[in-house]
Image (cartoon, grey):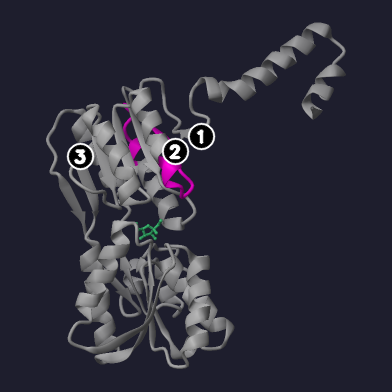
Amino acid sequence: MYLFNRIRIVPWKGGRYFLLSILILSLAGPVLLGCSEASRQDSADSAQWIIGMSQCNLGEPWRVQMNNDIRRAAEAHPELRVIFKDAQNDSLVQRSHIEEFIGQGVDCLIVSPKEAQPLTPPIAAAYRAGIPVIVLDRAVMGDEYTVFIGADNFAIGEMAGEWIAETLGGEGRIVELKGLMTSIPGHDRSNGFRQGIEDTNIEIIFEADMQWLEPNARREMESALARFDDIDLVYAHNDPGAHGAYLAARAVGRDDEIQFVGVDGLPHEGMQYVREGKLGATFIYPTGGAEAIDTALKLLRGESVPKEIELPTQAITRENVMDFLDLDIEE
Ligand code: FRU
């Protein structure tokens, strides 16, 4: 309304139509181009292949990093154009994004799915339609996709369990804050952890699904703190979860008596927390963004790739964190 009022006061009549057309074009342009929810990577028109990237959400720093890694890797290849879609943590929205990409006939699809069950069918549909599909980070069911790229979440959980068992001298009371249990990494990080603490006197006194989200972790930790006077350590399936738990403990003055362990190890997130002494350890979970572009290029060029590409992990503790961080960062 406001814009139309402004158009009405333009004195030159032809100018009115000119401005109106600009307005209509600027509003309708993105819709006509079919990318209202998509942000297109700037690239020359020389792009030979279009890659659709379906991201489950951009609420956590780790996922923003994944998209940045993809963007940066693709920028080195003018023959690629990446269209990003963000499902805002909604599996149904992500499903429709994948269907849109199939309809657009993208040359390759990268999907980092929110949940395994609801996203298996649309991923399989893309695969059956002949689109090479790269599943990134969170796995799906079955094998109807071209490549899976990700770290071994069971191994990460097990490493975390072994580190915790050693740090606590084989006994202690633990809170486990789980990632979304309808996603495979949540399951694997939990099962691996239980394997890692097997045959110790470590007891899980409280467990909850915080769905990978820091505010949920903080809330769950408030309940744990209210119920238990004696907590030795919190194992959270990601760094936002560990940080949420730390904040809850700090708010009631109990952060000094509890250790916090997370997963992800981003330099500007988990590694910083370790450096600041908020977390005792985190385990690197690479985004796989660069590897996804590498793999997409191979597939588009008709080269063969393995069905599964496993990314490495690494424990980050107070002992080695400075080897990973820039020593010049100010205190
Ligand atoms: C981000 C995230 C990461 C975690 C990964 C698991 O959405 O929760 O923190 O490591 O997803 O898929």
Q: Looking at the picture, which amino acid does disc 2 mark? A: Lys
**Dot 3 and dot 1 residues touching (CB under 8 Å):** no
Q: CA distance from mark 3 to mark 1?
A: 26 Å
Assign ligand 1 to one image quadrant: bottom left
Q: Earlier in the sequence, mark 3 or mark 2?
A: 2
Mark 2 is surrounded, within 10 Å at the Cα level, by few (under 14), some (14 to 19) or many (20 or more) other residues, namely many
Where residue 272 appears, as percent x and y from the top left, is 44, 70
Can you tell which quarter of the image residue 171 is in?
A: bottom left
Give whichever of 120, 302 is nearer the camera: 120
Mark 3 is surrounded, within 10 Å at the Cα level, by few (under 14), some (14 to 19) or many (20 or more) other residues, namely some
Magenta residues, as a range? 73-94
Instruction: Name the residue tied to disc 2.
Output: 85
Instruction: Name the residue tied to disc 1.
Output: 37
**Location of residue 160 with respect to 182 vertically, above or below:** below
Q: Looking at the picture, which amino acid does disc 3 mark? A: Glu
Can you tell which quarter of the image residue 146 is in?
A: top left
